[in-house]
Image (spheres, rainbow, N blue to C red):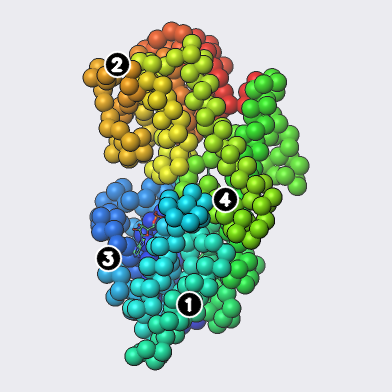
Amino acid sequence: MTISASHSSLGITNICCIGAGYVGGPTMAVIADRCPHLTVTVVDLNAERIAAWNDPDLSLLPVFEPGLDAVVGRARGRSLFFSTAVDEAIASADLVFLSVNTPTKTRGAGAGRASDLRWVEASARQVAAAATGHTIVVEKSTLPVRTAEAVKAILSASQGGTDSSKTFSVLSNPEFLAEGTAVSDLENPDRVLIGGEDPAAIEALASLYAHWVAPERILRTNLWSSELSKLTANAFLAQRISSINSIAAFCEATGADVQDVARAIGTDSRIGPRFLQSGPGFGGSCFQKDILNLVYLCQHYGLHEVAAYWEQVVALNDWQKQRIARLVVQRLFGTVSGKRIAVLGFAFKADTNDTREAPAIHICRDLLEEGAHLAIHDPKVPATQIARDLGQAPQHASSALGRDGSWELCDSPMEAANGADALLILTEWTAFRSLPWPDLAAVMRRPSWLFDARAIADADAARAAGFQVWQVGRG
Ligand code: NAD
Ligand code: UGA
């Protein structure tokens, strides 16, 4: 349903989004594209990131997402702006989205499980200080249940000062987009979830989305249900992946084929066909972090059995990554020391340049530990990012020392395969679905192995070219 510009978003004309990351950038770009009458300003402390969002060359945006360049191209400079002037953008906004990072705490109470809320708190304090008049503050970040209480406390502490007209309403509006399909997820969401206590604020935000989202897809709940729904959605999705990966290992042991099993169970309308693709384990910045947060909250409320149940989803995922690294070593005669392994794909999934918690990081680190030389090719991930993730700089095979593991970046699968003992597919990029098997076999050492952790390659063609083949879940 489309609402005309004259029936505006119940008084909202100026939007500020704090955080120009994987969520803030694409989400605001779509809002600005669909609501050309609004001014949407995305702010960030990271000047380099803002400069990249403002780059005239749309291929250099800091987030790679199919279709995002076109959306930004249409809206930028008209209704969409990127800036480092955080306070000014807050001051002129009727509505502020908090879209900052909420990673797992690395130290202090709850380290390794609880969400680190320092960026949320800092941005809430900034809103409290810089806002003018009435401001709707929207939690877009994924947050522990009852975080809105803390946000409200910070905001209300600033009310009643010199500016007596300064008031706030807090809403929860979690984001459900998946990377790689962010633009289509934002343009056609399964649902938009708004949690809150102030009906006018809820309706103002709902009317914004109503410019392109059908009314029955805009759900309203209380604050706590909204916050918890986001953690629960990610926990259920991740649980499906651990479930299918557990069955994949069982298929390999018994001679069944996990893709057949997934198809057979997926036709049951109660189960459904999506999210049943076994692979090297789930990655991405959120699944693990959000489940660990759920585990932490359950423990906090004394629900230890519930915590243990969800913790197992992460444990199985860790095991899947380790078992793939171990399996590669075993099949290569128990040692990969000094051997070249072509790694195809480093991003945590196809169609993104994001490597946060990518299974490739863990699998590559294990292989480096075993002394392998990794020839890595990914269509979108640069060497600087891989060096950060692996904790070591690239090194050409010829200069790699003795038994220490090393890695180099390659421009193509062919270059990576040159002289390699094995090809290891870790990301399901479309280009890896149809590789030139005879050409690859011709430049590799024999016996040549294909380890396909995504089960996307044409195994028959690879075998015909002389490869030994392992595919996840195929016994
Ligand atoms: P991100 O790290 O890509 O971006 C966050 C940005 O916030 C960074 O650029 C950082 O510099 C900026 N920032 C932090 N504190 C700030 C401050 N006080 N002022 C200005 N800028 C500040 O993170 P992301 O992937 O966009 O995730 C953001 C939130 O959305 C997280 O809570 C995440 O769980 C949630 N989420 C992410 C996804 C996803 O696909 N990545 C999907 C749904 C929800
Ligand atoms: C996920 C959710 O799908 C989004 O709804 C949510 O908004 C987001 O997390 C978030 O909160 O950050 P995302 O992590 O971007 O999105 O991507 P997914 O498509 O969910 O994939 C996550 C991981 O699971 C990837 O490593 C992917 O390869 C893996 N996966 C996914 C599988 O191994 N098998 C599948 O069938 C599906």
Identity of the amino acid at label 1? Answer: Ala
In the structure shown, which secondary structural element does the residue marked by tag 1 occupy? helix
Q: Within the image, what quadrant is residue 376 found in?
A: top left
**Vertical side of 273 occupied by 129: above or below:** below
Q: Are marks 3 and 4 in contact (CB under 8 Å)?
A: no
Q: Of label 3 and label 1, which has the lower sequence position?
A: 3
Instruction: Mark 3 or mark 2: name the one nearer the start of the chain.
Output: 3
Apparent side of residue 79 relative to residue 52 in the rendered image (left or right): right
| Between discs 2 and 4, the one toward the N terminus | 4
The answer to whether mark 3 and mark 1 are in CB contact below 8 A is no
Name the amino acid, label 2.
Gly
Label drawn at residue 153: 1
Q: In this view, does 165 lie above or below 255?
A: below
**Residue 172 in the image: above or below residue 243:** below
Is residue 154 at least partly visible in the picture?
yes
Residue identifier under label 3: 84
Earlier residue among tags 2 and 1: 1
Between circles 3 and 1, the one closer to the viewer is 1
